[in-house]
Image: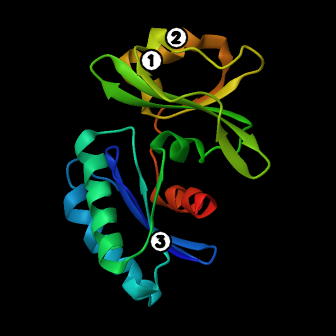
């Protein structure tokens, strides 16, 4: 399978090309430069791999939650390419993309939503898959609840550093580890999209 994936929902911008199990990716923390980077990076990855656009099986994107402009950009690019090539689009959750970075059993992903709120999603590993353990929400850090009180959760994403660590303070002992710098990668968008496809 050959799949082109875009991730522009946060301050990081990345594009990945999935080629029958191998992935090549361009990724950079580049606030407000996503529109300048995304398409040229996609063309560069296709050229590097020696793949024509017509050989792609699908286009994937991170559908949010995240920055409104960034999410819109990924949707517009993916839809434009998919329509031009008559290929399907596969959209995956940005929170699930962040959670995919961890090999832990129970993962809580959070993105700073600004304005005193966070986007939060809980995920659990079942075999090789990563499934939602709760509905994704946006709320104040103090309103976040975990799906259950059994066991600890591994925390990933900028939401855990937001508002001076309010979410970390709220969840306290329920967190086994915290990576407040984790940002989504298009390589993980591609892996999740291949499974969803």
Is residue 26 something one can see in this rendering? no
The local secondary structure at tag 1 comes to: loop
Residue 144 as seen in the image, left or right of residue 129: left
Q: How crowded is mark 1: few (under 14 residues within 10 Å), some or many (20 or more)?
A: some
Please, what secondary structure does the residue beneath circle 3 have? strand
Which one is earlier in the sequence, the residue at label 2 or at label 3?
A: 3
Residue for badge 3: 58
Q: Callout 2: 10 Å neighbours few (<14), some, many (20+)?
A: few
Which dot marks residue 2?
none
Residue 41, quarter of the rendered image:
bottom left
Q: Residue at x 52, y 62 (%)?
A: 190
Alpha-carbon span between mark 2 and mark 1 = 6 Å
Residue 115, percent from left and from top: 27, 19
Taking the spot 59% from the left edge, 58% from the top edge, the residue there is 196
Query: Which label number is shown at residue 165?
Result: 1
User: Measuring 27% from the left and 68% from the top, which residue is drawn there?
Assistant: 80
Res 26 quadrant in image: bottom left
Name the residue: 70% across, 45% down. 103
Whole-percent x, y for residue 14 in the image: 38, 59
Nearest-to-viewer mark from 2 and 3: 3
Vertical comparison of 125 with 89: above or below: above
Which residue matches tag 2? 169
Q: Which quadrant is the C terminus positioned in? A: bottom right
Q: Is residue 40 among the parts visible in the rendering?
A: yes
Q: In this view, does 107 lie above or below 19?
A: above
**What distance separates the C-alpha of mark 2 from that of mark 3?**
41 Å
Query: How many residues crowd around disc 3 within 10 Å: few (fewer than 14), some, or many (20 or more)?
Result: many
**Dot in front, 1 or 3:** 3
Percent of width and height locating residue 116? 32, 16
């Amino acid at each position: 399978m050959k799949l082109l994936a875009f991730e522009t929902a946060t301050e990081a911008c990345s594009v990945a090309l999935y080629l029958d199990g191998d992935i090549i990716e361009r990724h950079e923390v580049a606030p407000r430069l996503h529109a300048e980077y995304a398409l040229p990076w996609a063309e560069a990855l296709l050229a590097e791999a020696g793949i024509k656009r017509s050989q792609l099986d699908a286009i994937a994107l991170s559908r949010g939650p995240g920055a409104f402009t960034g999410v819109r950009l990924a949707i517009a690019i993916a839809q434009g390419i998919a329509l031009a090539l008559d290929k399907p689009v596969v959209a995956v959750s940005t929170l699930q993309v962040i959670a995919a970075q961890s090999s832990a059993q129970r993962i809580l992903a959070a993105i700073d939503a600004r304005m005193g709120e966070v986007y939060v999603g809980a995920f659990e590993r079942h075999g090789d898959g990563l499934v939602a353990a709760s509905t994704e929400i946006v709320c104040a850090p103090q309103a976040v609840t975990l799906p259950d009180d059994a066991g600890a959760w591994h925390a990933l994403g900028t939401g855990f550093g937001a508002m001076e660590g309010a979410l970390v303070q709220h969840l306290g002992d329920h967190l086994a580890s915290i990576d407040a710098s984790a940002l989504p990668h298009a390589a993980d968008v591609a892996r999740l999209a291949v499974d969803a496809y």
